[in-house]
Image: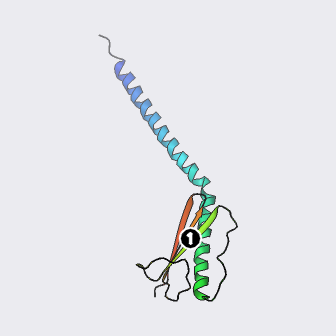
Amino acid sequence: MKRKGQAMILTILALGGTVVGATAIAGLLMTYQIRQSTDMGNSAKAIFAADTGVEWGLYQLFNPQTSLPGPVLSDPGGSYVLNCYENAQSVATTSCKSASTTIMRSLGVSRGVSRAFELDLTP
């Protein structure tokens, strides 16, 4: 019986399978990195939208007599939602004109990417 080459063939198949598996995993990770880098612009827009919401809440808090509408974002894909709370258990309101406002939460969204800021004003 001639089985001298059987071990070498099994070793080559095992090494080949390992290389193919490692290459597939590396390709998958690269795909995730490329996808993440293309959303960086939308992520920045969402952060700026969330920041705009917090700034608008602070403006309302320190100028409660204002009747101005909220700021309009220049990017048509960007928007923000501002919620103000009197404490952690209270119901959210979109107006931060109350002197008892202690928490502001702003969610910025730009084309499917969302980022949020929270401002805690408790002393």
Q: Amino acid at mark 1?
A: Val
The residue pinned by badge 1 equals 81
Q: Nearer the viewer, residue 116 or 33?
A: 116
* Picture layout, residue 70 above or below residue 46: below
Q: How many marks?
A: 1
Q: How is the image coloured?
A: rainbow
Crowd class of label 1 (few under 14; some 14 to 19; many from 20; radius 10 Å) = some
x then y, percent, for residue 57: 58, 80
Residue located 32% across and 12% down the image: 2
Q: Residue furthest top?
A: 1
- Provide residue 54's location: percent of width, then percent of height: 57, 76
Front in this rendered view, residue 100 or 10: 100
**Image spot of residue 111 (x, y percent):** 61, 58
Rendered location of residue 31, percent (x, y): 55, 45
Residue under the image location 61 percent in, 66 percent down:
79
Q: Is residue 31 above or below residue 108?
A: above
> In the drawing, does residue 83 fall left or right of residue 55?
left
Q: In this rendering, is residue 110 above or below 59?
A: above
Give the quadrant of the N terminus: top left
Residue at the image position 32 percent from the left and 15 percent from the top: 3
Direction right: furthest residue: 74
Q: Which secondary structure, mark 1?
A: strand
Q: Who is closer to the viewer here, 120 or 91?
A: 91
Residue 90 or residue 73, whichever sits in front: 90
